[in-house]
Image (tube, rainbow, N blue to C red):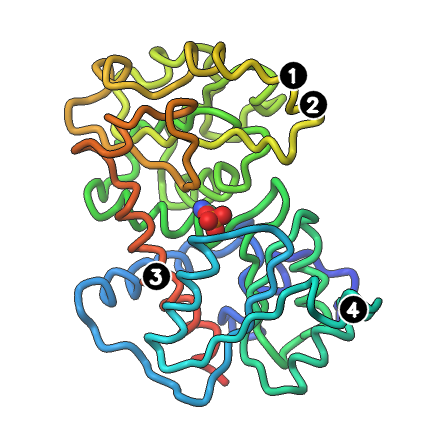
């Protein structure tokens, strides 16, 4: 049966008929061998492998929400592959004059752009862009609402496997605003696909999902969540996605949920600490932890470049 592109779900759009990556929209349903291949290639690049240089390729960044890490690391990755990277700012583009997303995407494809990274508060926008682009250009979801941030999930997996490669043994704690975090959702999808099955999600009740995803447990106390953990991931409160951010009691949040050296005493001695950034220091994480010996936060940033190089290579390898 031939399905119309308009009816396809993101997981059915991102692989071509040969099972090769043609868009990266979500980690939902992404085959584990595709994830593993991206992680292995990213690690090889981190270890000094030569990139597959292509001087004729173009990446466009199209961000409707702010970004430092994702946007710049994609641009650094593109430049290391010999690509030219271009910025399309929504407020300065013809989008502002009423041009539709579909017309914007087909115009970019006609201009010869090879890949567009899109970030938007609406998680369906990257999927709509992939439906418009079809096989003329790759679409990458650079963060979609509270739902998906696939390259962050993969770079977090890369950061963990560098030190702790046996996923089946890992106890992972994700602390904070899990409910509104696209990073947490993509992390959980990546980690469980790779074999993790002991993931604790902890935070105040109003910041936790209503139901624990498969292989996850909801925990209502910080020290219980990080007891015996191998990996602790702190999350930023997504104030931009809270209905009433003014009602947030920051002092109470810090008292109950801030990652401190004291709280980390109950984790495994070799436990690592991660944070996708940007951090609210002294709210969800203390300086001593963020800048301490357990911290892999800047390693995550560096790994983001290698992981995104691997993604750009994979998306264009069959063109
Ligand atoms: N982790 C992350 O997405 O950071 P930016 O918002 O800076 O891109």
Disc 2 from disc 1: Cα separation: 6 Å
User: Which of marks 2 and 4 precedes in the sequence?
Assistant: 4
Question: What residue is pinned by disc 4?
Answer: 4
Does 204 sit left or right of 152 as displayed?
right
| Residue 170 seen anywhere in this rendered image of the structure | yes
Question: What residue is pinned by disc 3?
Answer: 305
Secondary structure at numbered mark 3:
helix
Question: What residue is pinned by disc 2?
Answer: 244
Disc 2 from disc 3: Cα separation: 35 Å
User: Which of marks 4 and 3 precedes in the sequence?
Assistant: 4
| Residue 15 seen anywhere in this rendered image of the structure | no
Counting from the top left corner in percent of width and height, residue 306 is at: 31, 62
Counting from the top left corner in percent of width and height, residue 81 is at: 35, 78
Say few, some or many: other residues with alpha carbon within 10 Å of mark 2 (under 14 / 14 to 19 / 20 or more). Answer: few
Asked where in the image residue 137 lies, by quadrant, the reply is: bottom right
User: Between 129 and 4, which is closer to the camera in this rendering?
Assistant: 129
Q: Which mark is residue 41?
A: none
Mark 3 near mark 4, Cβ–Cβ under 8 Å? no
Question: What residue is pinned by disc 1?
Answer: 247
User: Which of marks 3 and 1 precedes in the sequence?
Assistant: 1
What residue is drawn where x is 41% and y is 41%?
A: 277
Disc 4 from disc 2: Cα separation: 40 Å
What residue is drawn where x is 63% and y is 81%?
A: 136
Secondary structure at numbered mark 4:
loop
What residue is drawn where x is 37% and y is 51%?
A: 155
Does 48 sit left or right of 96 as displayed?
left
Disc 4 from disc 1: Cα separation: 45 Å
């Amino acid at each position: 049966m031939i399905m119309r592109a308009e009816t396809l779900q993101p997981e059915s759009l991102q692989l071509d008929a040969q099972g090769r990556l043609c868009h990266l929209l979500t980690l939902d349903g992404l085959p584990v061998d595709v994830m593993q291949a991206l992680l292995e290639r990213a690690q090889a690049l981190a270890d000094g492998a030569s990139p597959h240089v292509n001087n004729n390729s173009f990446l466009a960044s199209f961000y409707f929400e702010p970004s430092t890490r994702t946007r710049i690391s994609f641009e650094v990755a593109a430049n290391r592959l010999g690509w030219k990277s271009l910025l399309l700012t929504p407020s300065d583009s013809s989008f502002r004059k009423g041009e539709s997303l579909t017309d914007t995407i087909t115009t970019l494809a006609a201009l010869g752009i090879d890949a567009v990274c899109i970030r938007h508060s609406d998680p369906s926008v990257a999927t709509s862009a992939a439906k418009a682009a079809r096989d003329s250009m790759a679409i990458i979801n650079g963060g979609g609402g509270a739902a998906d941030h696939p390259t962050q999930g993969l770079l977090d997996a890369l950061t963990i496997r560098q030190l702790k490669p046996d996923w089946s043994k890992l106890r992972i704690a994700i602390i904070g605003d899990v409910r509104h975090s696209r990073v947490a959702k993509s992390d959980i999808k990546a980690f469980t696909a790779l074999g993790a099955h002991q993931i604790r999600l902890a935070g105040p009740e109003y910041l936790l999902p209503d139901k624990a995803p498969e292989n996850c447990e909801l925990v209502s106390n910080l020290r219980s969540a990080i007891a015996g953990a191998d990996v602790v991931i702190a999350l930023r409160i997504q104030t931009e996605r809270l209905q009433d951010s003014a009602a947030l009691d920051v002092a109470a949040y810090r008292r109950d949920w801030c990652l401190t050296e004291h709280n980390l005493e109950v984790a495994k001695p070799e436990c690592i600490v991660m944070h996708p950034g940007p951090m609210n220091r002294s709210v969800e994480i203390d300086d001593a932890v963020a800048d301490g010996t357990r911290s892999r936060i800047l390693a995550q940033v560096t790994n983001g470049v290698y992981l995104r190089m691997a993604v750009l290579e994979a998306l264009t390898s069959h063109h």
